[in-house]
Structures are given as structure tokens and as C-alpha cells.
Image (cartoon, rainbow, N blue to C red):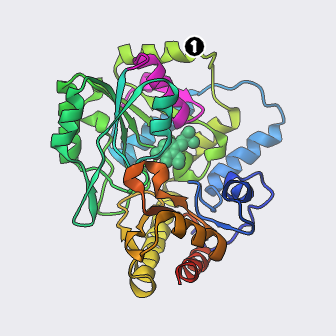
Amino acid sequence: MENFDRIINRKATASVKWDMAESIFGERDLLPLWVADMDFEAPLPVKEALNKRVQHGIYGYSYPTTEVKSSITNWFKSRHSWSFSQDAILYSPGVVPSIATAIQSLTEKGDRILIQTPVYYPFFQLIQENDRKVVDCPLVIQNDQYHIDFDAFEECLKQGVKLFLFCSPHNPVGRVWTNEEQTKIADLCKAYNVIIISDEIHCDLVYSPHTHIPIAKANQDHVITLTAPSKTFNIAGLQSALMIIENQQLRVKIENSQKKQGFFTVNALGLVAMEAAYRDGAQWVDELLAYLEKNKKFVSSYLVQHLPNVKMIDAQGTFLLWLDFRETGFHEEEVNKRLLSKGKIALERGSKYGDAGAGFFRLNIGCSRDQLETAMHKMKQALQ
Ligand SMILES: Cc1ncc(COP(=O)(O)O)c(C=O)c1O
């Protein structure tokens, strides 16, 4: 059994989460619960495979071998009942670079691209930085959970949208989309000839009874799936991601765009880690999910008991909790100030995810229970 309670000092490892917190938030000695990586060691088989590769001593160019490809296809078949051919896989240094490539290769300047805020902020930043237009169809809260307003969604598609950037499971709100919802999305996008760029980076981190369904299963011709082992196995710094594209025409367009960028292959160690993780990491992920779920329940009951004005949206997936501070009587700015200067904890503020996120904060629970307990006590002090 993996010991997720073990606290490992990540300071002075050039960690964005730990070592950049002070310069980003302007406060010293922060407990960082912001950027989306976890404070857990990668699974032992990943460490062992990396150690072996590092010991070899020569780090020349690498390519995705048949073993890498089989570990990927086997993983998605066994964990998500999704089969695709090895030829459908393209590689990339990250899901964010993959989104940029998709935008650049499938749309022109001025084209409209649909998103659902609050959403992972590179979604709208990349649209804007590439001189395309954001069409936003904000998610709506009903019965304490986020939903899609399908009438509004269709109205947005009618505006002549080219792409839909879908986040599944959704960061930051933690929704795991149902089969029914995804079938509607897939059918509507097909009817309006809209390509779905489905960011499924959090696909493996889903709490029972919810199950992640790759939207490509509903509409493989109109979908580009972007995913990676990075969130699942905590190996984001190895920068190796996947694009799964069953439609050959779309795949060729993306490949041509990668060629134009001079992109050739991913990092040698990233490939080693990916293969070991997908081949031998299943048990570790099951244990991780059980731990994260307990962390989630701890936060939920802590809030009910000590901070009843802070409401938690029940995350169906991801290690990110979306907390609603709007009933605390403080504006987001004031909550932010208090969390940072009084509480000494760094969370991501909701407005970063679009106007629809104002008043919320995103809490990363990918850490030991001990650290999470400390964080929650600090949150309580900050709001008193
Ligand atoms: C939805 C989503 N997509 C992409 C990323 C980042 O992907 P990458 O590091 O592979 O660019 C994150 C990281 O938090 C994320 O939450």
C-alpha cells in the first residue's frame, strides 16, 4: 500500500507550486494548495523505470515504442472501456500546447470557439492569444451542482462556432459528465458541424459511482481527445501528453501543424514514465482515489462544522475542490487577502476561471491529510 500520509519536502526542487508561491502571491511561508499537481511521490514502478533509464547515462532522442503505445491503448481499454488504434495517437509536450495546436490548425483568426466557464483559464487565454473569439456558455448551478443549459448551448452553436473546448472531467467544478449529457453534446456538435476538443486530462481521477466516459465514444469523427498520465500519476513535470484522434483527416491537420512548429517527439524520460505508469500503475491509482476521497470528505465535514458559510461543490472527479465563499459576507478580494496574509494558504481565486467563478476558490486536496487539516484550520482562522 502506498503511504500517502508521508510528507515529502518539495521546497528547493524548482517546484512551481512550492517555490514560486511567494513570488506569485506576494506572501512568505505560504502553504500552497493552488497549482494542480499533488504532493505525492509517483508510483514505485514509475520511479524504478525512471531510475533504470537515468542510470543508463545516455539521453539521446527517443520515440514512442510499440510498448509505450500498447501501455496507452491497454490502459484506456481496461480503465475506460475505450479502444482505439495505436495510429490514432499523437504526442505532445502537454495538453495546453495541444489545445493551442488544435486552435491554430483547425480555425482561422476571428473564428468563434465555445467554452463553458468557470473553466481552466488557458481555455480562454489561448483563444484570445490566437486572435480567435471566445463564445461562453457558462455552466449553471442547480441543486448545488453544475449543469449545462442545453438551450443556451445550442444558441451558442448557432453563432457559427468552429470548435468546442470541452473539459471532461471539468476543472474547476469537478463535474464528471454523464452519458446522457455527452450524447446531447456530441449530437449537437455534429448537427452544427463543430469539432469537440475534449480535454480529458483528469479522466482517471473520478469518484465512484461516477464514471468517466470519453466523449469520442459517442462521436469519434468530430472529437479530438487530449489527455496525459500527468495528473493521474503526478508526473506533470515530465511533460508528455497524448492526442487521440480517430478521424484521419483531423489527425493529418494536427500532424501538419506540429511539423510546422518543428515538433518531433517528446521527452525520453516522459515516455519511460508514461509506459510504466499505464502498464503498472493501476493499483496505485485505486489507492490514490481512496485517499483523495477521504480528503474530500474531510473538507466537506470540516466546512459544515467550522465554516458553514463556505459551501463545497461536491467534486465527482479531480483532486480540486471548488469552494463557494459568497455567503461569508466578504468579497473575493477580501477572502483572498485573508487567506494569504492571515491564513498563509494559497488557493486559486475563482475569478481567474472567468466571471462565473467570482466568489469561489479552488482548493487542491492532492496532499497529505495532515497538511490538509492544517490548511483548513488556517482557513478558519483567516475568516474569523
Ligand atoms: C483541464 C486541464 N487541462 C490541462 C492542464 C495542464 O496540462 P499540461 O500540463 O499537460 O499542459 C491542466 C492542469 O491543471 C488542467 O487542469
Magenta stretch holds residue 86: yes
Question: Is the CB of the residue bearing disc 1 within 8 angstroms of ligand 1?
Answer: no
In the image, residue 203 above or below residue 98 = below
Kind of residue indicated by mark 1: Lys
Report the magenta residues as a range: 84-110
In the rendered image, is residue 370 in sight?
Answer: yes
Q: Which residue is mark 1?
A: 259
Indicate the secondary structure of the residue bearing disc 1.
Answer: helix
Q: Is residue 378 left or right of residue 247?
A: right
- Kindly give the residue lying farthest to the bottom in the view shown: 305
Position of residue 243 measured from the top left corner of the image (x, y, whole percent): 46, 30
Frontmost residue, 7 versus 72: 7
Frontmost residue, 272 versus 263: 263
Position of residue 314 measured from the top left corner of the image (x, y, whole percent): 35, 66
Q: Residue at x 17, y 25 (%)?
A: 191
Q: Quadrant of residue 83?
A: top left
Q: Is residue 197 left or right of residue 292?
A: left
Q: Is residue 118 left or right of residue 36?
A: left
Label 1: how many Cα within 10 Å (few below 14, some 14–19, many 20+): few
Q: Residue at x 51, y 58 (%)?
A: 349
Q: Residue at x 33, y 63 (%)?
A: 208
Position of residue 80 measured from the top left corner of the image (x, y, whole percent): 35, 46
In the rendered image, is residue 186 in sight?
Answer: no
Magenta stretch holds residue 45: no
Position of residue 195 measured from the top left corner of the image (x, y, whole percent): 31, 26
